[in-house]
Amino acid sequence: MFSNLTPMVKNLLIVNIVIHLLANLVPNDFIRQLFSFYNPILPGTPDLWNPNFKPWQIISYMFLHSRDTFMHLFSNMFALLIFGPAIEAYMGSGRFLKYYIICGIGAAFFNMGMDYLAFFQSAQGDMELQYLAIKSMLGASGAIFGILVAFAMIFPNIEMMLLFFPVPIKAKYFVAMYAIFEIVQAFGRTATGIAHWAHIGGLITGFILLQFFHFKERKFY
């Protein structure tokens, strides 16, 4: 596993782990409050602007993970470790990093759009407004879902053995089932606190980017 570790995947692993340790050492969760992503606009407020939002959060949020459970960091970094090297080897390190970051940004925008849609469709505007005002998002999951869809599209027929699935399953079917699961969770809101729409946003962003990657003479901007 570690013998095939590629440079950018290694750098991302180190950065995420170091930032997680630093964030846990700083009191009052100051780093997460400053660098997590907050929706910039608060519908229904006099000035519409969320004072918690800062422009850099659109990128910084994807390098932070929950303090409450180590599994948030571990699951994302494990997926990066398993799927990332093959994608980096295929794309090249520079393109891989661009792809990773853009998928994370796309995930944040998609999740934000779904938050606003929920607000405008809700009959309980005050409750949704409070939710938007205090809610923040953090984690590499959106970027990781971009990597998952890339793996499924570039290596669709590679068979995988999963701990929770007793028979081999091709990558394209695994990612398709995972996407359906996330959509069901997002609409059902069965797991409060998990940004399922960000996961879907990262997947969609990755899918769109890969169309340009494949069909424009293998150039990726």
Image (spheres, helix red, strand yellow):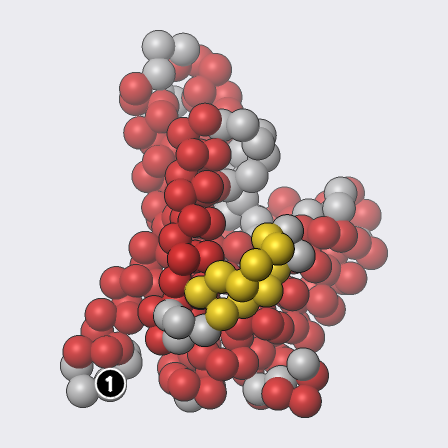
Q: Quadrant of the C terminus?
A: bottom left
Residue drawn at point x = 54 percent, y = 44 percent: 137
Q: Evaluate whether residue 154 shows in this view.
A: yes
Q: 107 or 49: nearer the eye?
A: 107
Residue drawn at point x = 28 percent, y = 70 percent: 210
Give the image quarter of residue 182.
Answer: top left
Q: 66 or 79: nearer the eye?
A: 79
Give the image quarter of residue 121.
Answer: top left
* Element assignment for label 1: loop
Image spot of residue 130 (x, y percent): 50, 21
Image spot of residue 205 (x, y percent): 32, 59
**Residue 93 appears left or right of 12:** left
Residue drawn at point x = 54 percent, y = 81 percent: 85
Check disc 1: other Cα within 10 Å, few if <14, some if 14-19, many if 20+.
Answer: few
**Residue 97 appears left or right of 8:** left
**Residue 3 appears left or right of 118:** right
**Residue 96 appears left or right of 2:** left
- Using the image, determine if residue 175 lies above or below residue 136: below
Q: Which residue is mark 1?
A: 219
- Using the image, determine if residue 28 lies above or below residue 48: below
Q: Which amino acid type is shown beneath numbered disc 1?
A: Lys
Q: Evaluate whether residue 50 shows in this view.
A: no
Image spot of residue 64 (x, y percent): 63, 56
Among all residues in the image, which is located at the extreme front? 167
Residue drawn at point x = 44 percent, y = 20 percent: 128
